[in-house]
């Protein structure tokens, strides 16, 4: 996994609450056995009409947000199914950071396994970010080491578990880390039988 | 005597392999259930790094999400077929037991785990599926994981997890006649919202919960994830023990007695403290119908679709939901016509669900213009239902009787609700497009779904004599 230390990018505002994983990636795209290539299906039913043409009214289709890499959403982002296809699609589409006032647990965890940084910020802050990005596209700079998000003039800090932080900063393969505890797992299993 | 503990803490403490300040705990996983949709990339990951499945004996796989429920020998969709073949090849390569599409034990992963006795009190159980919370009905700590974690558990039989907060959801009093476990959980989510459980494991307690059968408890725990909870469970008791006795994978003879003592000792201690407690009165609950696009958007069957101008919060969201659902603000629930009825899914596809729906259907006829299907949760349920003649009751009334799978719960196979059409469904999610792009889902109990099939619209099931024991 690619380490993520700092990131500067264009903000895409998604002003909806309870964005569920069925919306992030609809089930007709879950049949693939690969891990790559899900970005084209991100928010599919919101982005495309039945005939495959783009829905102009959906903001992600607005050219001003082209190349956006920081998604700012509403409460309970990523609720619903455990499908990791959701973070795969978000990442493959080009997003590196997702900011929301609250996240669903499984989605939040899944992000770290895929080099995406989910940041929880107070709702007043996220609502301001959404409003600002809707008015005129702008960039944010995220610094994971310092745990800060800044637009150049205002800076807010965020919380993250040290374990998650380390994982992203180092781009760790979690299984390799766990396998260094193999003797502990062996001992545990011996106790079981 | 030590401090009073909840079942959640007891199970957790027993499973910690390693703990360290500032880190999540490394938690041992007793049982890993696997299905075709969230596993291919995990097995591929193992292959690429030359790793093995650490404990194939603690891993069990089936096919459910994708499988056709008619004409099973021909799978038309090439991509689905590939996904199923991939699971079969992976299970062979890594030595994992598989109930594939031709296997008599095949079924929805959350139906067969309990059925086979794999699910037991005190176990930590994971699956690449959010409704793994179902197994909590037995007093197991069971939760859904993503594909990277599936790979992690395959390779290490463990997971890094931070200790969850605990929440008690207390259900006092008794459920009325014709009011089911499904109505109970819909009412709980309706009252407290889709994220009240975030970061918590819920324990359901109280008289109404104690009175539920095992299958009803599974219905309740199944939908814990719709409340945002990491898991939901119920302390084991006599009901749990009676259900488990004699199942294929439960211990037998003397070992069973030893297991029972251990199981019962897991129940939360008197006076144990939870991080939060909420309560609800069972006798206030009525049969529920969801009108919107998340499971908290439900009202009693006698109620109306809300008016966005009158709701306390998220008026935009309510408006969007009403538009998507093709309803009018203030419209009465019983005036909503249905075109599809789906009785199935890991929430409501077990024997008791089918029996109760059949009681309503008996002697009736599916309303003109309604397409109604019954999809048993497992091939075992299907066989037993046929032995009891339930298939004949459904077929005579004009329902279709299918093979086991997830089917129209998520519409990954051919069982799809067309755009703009409306379905009364016993499943657990009414998200936009869940049952097909543009499909409109109303979540209900099996008896409410059966009644809607006969009447072509939502009706109060309590008007059927059979629902009130008459
Ligand atoms: S029945 Fe529905 S909710 Fe249950 S496992 Fe299958 S798809 Fe998921």
Image (cartoon, helix red, strand yellow):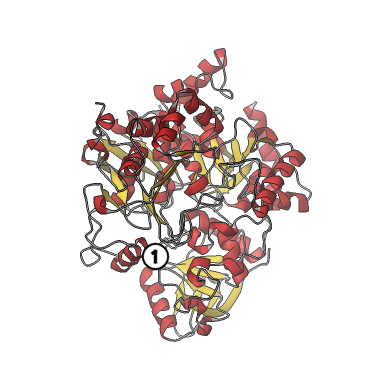
Inspect this view and state whether residue B92 appears: yes
* Residue drawn at the location 37% of the way across and 54% of the way down: B194
Where is residue B18? Give x, y as percent.
60, 42
Query: Is residue A181 shown left or right of residue A80?
Result: right
Count up the numbered dots. Answer: 1
Quadrant location of residue B172?
top left
Q: Is residue B260 above or below residue B307?
A: above
* Residue drawn at the location 26% of the way across and 26% of the way down: B469
Where is residue B207? Give x, y as percent.
28, 31
Query: Is residue B172 shown left or right of residue B66?
Result: left
Q: Secondary structure at mark 1?
A: loop
* Residue drawn at the location 48% of the way across and 54% of the way down: A105
Where is residue B251? Give x, y as percent.
57, 20
Judge by depth and name the residue closer to the eye, B408 or B454: B454
Where is residue B357? Give x, y as percent.
37, 34
Residue position marked by numbered label 1 in the rendering: A17
Q: Is residue B16 above or below residue B328?
A: above
Quadrant location of residue A27?
bottom right
Judge by depth and name the residue closer to the eye, B203 or B466: B466
Instruction: Report the residue that reaches farthest toward the right.
Output: B50
- Give the quadrant of the C terminus of chain B: top left
Q: Chain of mark 1?
A: A
């Amino acid at each position: 996994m690619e380490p993520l230390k700092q990131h500067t990018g264009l903000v895409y505002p998604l002003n909806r609450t309870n964005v569920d994983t069925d919306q992030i990636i609809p089930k007709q795209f879950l049949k693939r056995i690969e891990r790559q290539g899900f970005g084209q299906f991100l928010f599919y039913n919101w982005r495309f009409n039945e005939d495959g043409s783009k829905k102009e009214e959906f903001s992600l289709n607005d050219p001003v947000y082209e190349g956006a890499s920081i998604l700012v959403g509403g409460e309970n982002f990523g609720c619903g199914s455990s499908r990791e296809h959701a973070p795969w699609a978000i990442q493959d589409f080009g997003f590196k950071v997702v900011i929301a006032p609250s996240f669903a647990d499984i989605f939040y965890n899944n992000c770290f396994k895929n080099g995406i940084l989910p940041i929880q910020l107070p709702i007043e802050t996220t609502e301001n970010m959404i409003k600002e990005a809707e008015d005129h596209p702008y960039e944010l700079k995220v610094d994971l080491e310092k745990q800060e998000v800044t637009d150049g003039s205002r800076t807010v800090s965020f919380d993250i578990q040290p374990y998650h932080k380390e994982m992203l900063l180092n781009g760790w393969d979690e299984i390799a880390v766990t396998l260094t505890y193999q003797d502990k797992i062996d001992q545990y299993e011996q106790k079981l039988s | 005597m030590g401090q009073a503990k909840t079942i959640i803490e007891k199970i957790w403490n027993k499973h910690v392999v390693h703990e360290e300040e500032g880190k999540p705990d490394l938690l041992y996983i007793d049982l890993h259930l696997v299905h075709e949709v969230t596993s291919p990339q995990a097995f591929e990951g193992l292959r690429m790094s030359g790793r093995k499945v650490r404990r194939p004996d603690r891993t069990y796989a089936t096919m459910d999400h994708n499988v056709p429920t008619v004409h099973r020998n021909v799978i038309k969709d090439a991509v689905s077929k590939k996904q199923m073949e991939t699971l079969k090849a992976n299970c062979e390569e890594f030595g994992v037991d598989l109930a594939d599409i031709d296997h008599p034990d095949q079924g929805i992963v959350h139906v067969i785990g309990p059925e086979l006795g794999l699910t037991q009190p005190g176990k930590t159980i994971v699956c690449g599926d959010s409704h793994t919370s179902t197994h909590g009905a037995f007093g197991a700590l069971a939760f859904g994981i993503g594909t990277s974690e599936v790979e992690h558990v395959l390779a290490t039989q463990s997971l890094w997890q931070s200790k969850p907060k605990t929440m008690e959801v207390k259900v006092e009093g008794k459920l009325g006649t014709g009011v089911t476990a499904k109505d109970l959980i819909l009412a709980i989510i309706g009252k407290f919202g889709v994220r009240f459980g975030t970061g918590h494991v819920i324990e359901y307690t109280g008289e109404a919960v104690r009175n539920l059968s095992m299958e009803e408890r599974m219905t309740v725990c199944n939908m814990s994830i719709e409340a945002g909870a990491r898991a939901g469970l119920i302390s084991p008791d006599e009901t749990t023990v009676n259900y488990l006795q004699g199942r294929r994978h439960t211990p037998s003879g003397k070992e069973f007695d030893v297991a029972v003592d251990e199981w019962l000792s897991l129940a939360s201690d008197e006076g144990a403290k939870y991080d939060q407690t909420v309560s609800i009165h069972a006798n206030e609950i009525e049969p529920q119908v969801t009108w919107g696009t998340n499971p908290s958007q439900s009202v009693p069957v006698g109620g109306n679709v809300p008016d966005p101008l009158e709701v306390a919060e998220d008026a935009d969201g309510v408006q969007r939901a009403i538009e998507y659902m093709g309803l009018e603000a203030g419209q009465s629930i019983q005036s909503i016509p249905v075109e599809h009825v789906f009785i199935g899914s890991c929430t409501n596809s077990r024997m008791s669900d089918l029996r109760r729906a059949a009681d309503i259907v008996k002697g009736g006829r599916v309303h003109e213009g309604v397409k109604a299907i019954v999809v048993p949760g497992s091939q075992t349920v299907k066989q037993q239902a046929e032995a009891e003649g339930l298939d004949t009751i459904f077929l005579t009334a004009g329902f279709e009787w299918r093979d086991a799978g997830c089917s129209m719960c998520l519409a990954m196979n051919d069982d799809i609700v067309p755009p703009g059409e409306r379905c009364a469904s016993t499943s657990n999610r009414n998200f936009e497009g869940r049952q097909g792009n543009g499909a409109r889902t109303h979540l209900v109990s099996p008896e409410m779904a059966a009644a809607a099939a006969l009447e072509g619209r939502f009706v109060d099931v309590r008007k059927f004599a059979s629902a009130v024991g008459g």
